[in-house]
Amino acid sequence: MKKLNILTDKTIKANKPKDKKYYLNDGDGLYLLITPNNYKIWVFRFMLNSKRYETTFKNYPSVSLSEARKKRDDYRKLINDKINPIHHFRELNKKQIIEDKSNLENIFNEWLENQKTNSGLNQWEWKKQRIYKDVILPLGIDRNINDVTIDDIKKVLNAKSKEAPSTAKKLFNYLENILSYAMSHSYLKSNVLSNVDKYHILENKPQKAKNHPQITNQEYFKELVNSIYSYDKNLTIKNALKLVLHIPLRAENLSKLRWDYIDFDNKLLTIPRAEMKAKNSNYPDFKMPLSDEVIKILENQKEYFLKSEWVFSKLTNIKENIDYQVLNNALIKMGFNDEKIGKKIRLHGFRGTFRSLINTLDIENRFTFEIKENALDHHTGEDTVKAYTNKSNYTNQLKPLMDFWSGFIVGLLE
């Protein structure tokens, strides 16, 4: 029978440091290491699956003799069940760290710090103050994020929607983004806002925009991409549809795109503010970085139609811009007209498809809400928020988003 509990406190204290480290054996794998500088460290050794392992239980006397024996016995129970105690307790520690960091205030602060590099300073300050005051505080700063229910969120957002419906809508979007961040960092087990329409949450609803048919099923989207790239009836129609796949322009902006809006050298599209839906002169011109694939599409179009001022001119008269209904008709002929199964799309629906799929694909939460909205030239919310947003230049931050989106599309080609 193996000898157990050989050591005593008196024995331990009586053993002095030597020129070289040495061990005192307490039995069943538990040792006390004594170093030349008089550190006394608990060491536990064991065999599992024909492999030798060693771990430490910290120093004596901060871990007492009885505590070290208790830990040895706990480890032995796991070993008897063929469980590696080192891996087991390491995993438990990880879970505990995550548990300790899973309160709303901590996650909000992490998310906010993540947003700092991708938001203008004023917009970041607005988030810091408004979201904390209107969402985090009412939900409970010390509350574990996994305990937050859909009813809790409804209560908080509807309290805000009574006085400011558009702000409540914006807060919903930010909260959705925060929960997505928490999911991607293993703080949250299940996202209660996943697949929830904000208009089903908010009682005092802001005016809902008209829905345009869009494709959000990735298999149907892949079919759409390949149908457009293989379209052979007309080069202008093909290139216009290819372009709107990569850049979510409004139908009118696409059809009225001019060559002098495109800077090939700097790979940049600039549309004057007066040509955009939001014509407020306080807003800057719309600027969109162009991916390598978009440059290829435009260079192909330029090769044949540079004599027209329009990138996409009428099929019968290059002095006039193309009618976007011609592009919608091409989509119908390609077979994308079945709304029941989610396989119907029109030109304006490419914007919704972009927004929906980017949210799905951005599992690492790389792109902020503002950047995604900026790609669509969306300007909503309170006047102060608009003012903050206008001062922010997102052009450089848009480039990785649009490169990512173009790369995703090209990756779908067969």
Image (spheres, helix red, strand yellow):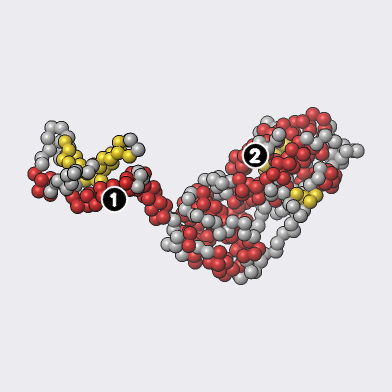
Q: Give SS at disc 2.
A: helix
Q: In this view, does 130 lie to the left or right of 313?
A: left
Judge whether 85 appears above or below 131 on screen. Answer: above
Front-lying residue, 182 or 414: 414
Q: How far apart are marks 2 and 1 (CA)?
A: 50 Å
Task: State the image coordinates of residue 94 (x, y, percent, origin top left).
Answer: 39, 49
Image quadrant for the C terminus? Answer: top right
* Residue type beneath disc 2: Phe
Does residue 19 show up? Answer: yes
Front-lying residue, 349 or 135: 349
Residue at 66% of width from left, 66% of height from top? 205
Farthest residue toward the right? 316
Does residue 275 show up? Answer: no
Residue at 61% of width from left, 49% of height from top? 359
Q: Is residue 46 left or right of residue 326?
A: left
Image quadrant for the N terminus? Answer: top left
Front-lying residue, 80 or 289: 80
Snapshot quadrant of residue 254: top right
Residue at 14% of width from left, 46% of height from top? 7
Q: Is residue 178 left or right of residue 266?
A: left
**Pointer 1 residue:** 74
Residue at 68% of width from left, 36% of height from top? 410
Count of labels shown?
2
Cβ–Cβ under 8 Å for marks 2 and 1: no
**Pointer 2 residue:** 408
Q: In this view, does 177 lie to the left or right of 11?
A: right
Front-lying residue, 79 or 274: 79
* Residue type beneath disc 1: Asp
